[in-house]
Image (cartoon, rainbow, N blue to C red):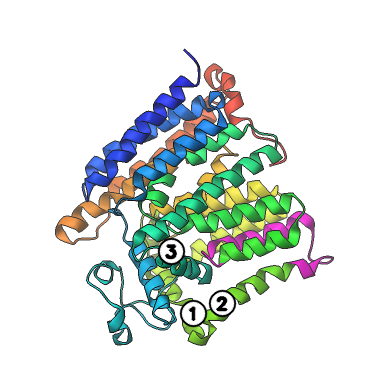
Amino acid sequence: MQRWIVPLLMGLVMTSSFAAMPALGKHVPVFFMLFGIASVAYLIAIWHCKYVPLTAIVLVSVVFRLSLLFSIPALSDDIYRYVWDGRVQWAGVNPYRFAPAAQELVHVRDALIFSKINHPELPTIYPPIAQMAFWVGYGISSGILGIKMLLVCADLIAGWLIVCLLRHFEQRPQWVLIYFWHPLIVVEIAGNGHIESLGIVALLAALYLFFKGRDRIALSALGGAVLVKFFPLVFLPYFVRWKGWLPTNWSALLMVPCVILLGYLPYAWAGASVFGSLGTYAQHWSFNSAIFDVLILLCGNGQIARGIIGLLFLSVVLFLIWKRIPLLRCAYLTAAAFVLLTPTLHPWYVVWLIPFLVFFRHPPWIAFSLLVVLSYHILIQYQTRGVWVEAAWVQWVEYGGLALVGIAYLLFKHTEILTKAGRFFNIHRQI
């Protein structure tokens, strides 16, 4: 039997799992079963991925995405806020000026979209390039499909950039299967339609252009990533440290603030409201965060716990800068620290980590990126009884799985089976 048959059979299993998901509606336990089947097939496919032609990896990944592209998101309602923001802009209204529930927007409401917006009393939190994408997506289709099409296109371009980076670092391009076939990527981008793919493609473009010596364009792309989600701004110090720019080439750094200012310019007449409900999100929201929950128990104060989290994350960033860790590894470790420390960890936030798992193939994080969907368990009670309460066992499985796989990897990585598998964990010394 040809060695590429096994991963392609796993691709068929995954396709069947994804194709069955749109019919589930709100049946979360059945989703867990299908996602689990896809995850097992995915792990087997990773082990055999070097035998699969790159073209086959890409084509199968497109089939995955098409199987969920036309589905109605059942696990998240974020996309309805995207559609709303796009509709408001097409109505000639600045999306930062009014919350969806404001009386000034009564004429824009409809029964289908408005009723599904979460927290309609809060103004939008999404930065300008995200808003522009919502505007374009709504212009393509006045529902969720246009926006999902844009996000899936960005997702596929992100995979192409990962292939470019793999070739730059002289790694097998087939490792892109880790990203292209990852069940969480397929579900959260093609299925639930999350904006993360747009930010990730800009961040990957920034990294690739930077490694190719196109510094100013790279920093412009980084500014673009910040205009989708604020998180990528934390990567700027690594770019600076990597080339020692501050005293000699500070003018290149102006590209980031210039791009950010240009992005906000069309919306600037909303004043301070352009930052939307960011403050409310940062100060009050929390979900599925083990370390934050432990700090709450220890100090009994949410704001103090958030302050400690901020200091811990800043310490990680400063340590990586001080140790002159290579840029791509800095990005990977920072994304991992974000996942561990953020007070709010929805499954789609882990999407930021997955592109780096292509290069740093560490089993604990691969396992966690699959286990994190268990946090959707909260929807079972919420959809039936309207109660939003986390089950303690979910975090034990998620973070316990991360810890157990990590310990097992450290204990057994020098045994015969993992020594033979050394090709899997062989990381280029420059990254």
Say whether residue 250 is magenta: yes
Q: Is residue 170 visible?
A: yes
Give the mark, 2 or 1, whose residue is nearer the N terminus.
2
Labels 2 and 1 touching (C-beta < 8 A): yes
Give the mark, 3 or 1, whose residue is nearer the N terminus.
3
Q: Secondary structure at mark 1?
A: helix
Q: Residue furthest right?
A: 248
Q: Secondary structure at mark 3?
A: helix
What residue lies at 40% left-to-right and 60% top-to-bottom? 146
What residue lies at 38% left-to-right and 70% top-to-bottom? 284
Numbered disc in front, either 3 or 2 = 3
Q: Position of residue 67 (x, y in %)?
A: 35, 43
Q: Position of residue 107 (x, y in %)?
A: 29, 83
Residue holding disc 1: 274
Residue holding disc 2: 264
**Residue 83, quarter of picture:** bottom left
What residue lies at 23% left-to-right and 45% top-to-bottom? 23
Q: Which residues are magenta?
A: 227-252
Numbered disc in front, either 2 or 1 = 2
Residue holding disc 3: 137
Say whether residue 351 is magenta: no
Please tell me whether residue 403 is drawn above or below residue 223 in the rendered image. Answer: above
Q: Choose between 332 and 159: the one closer to the eye.
A: 159
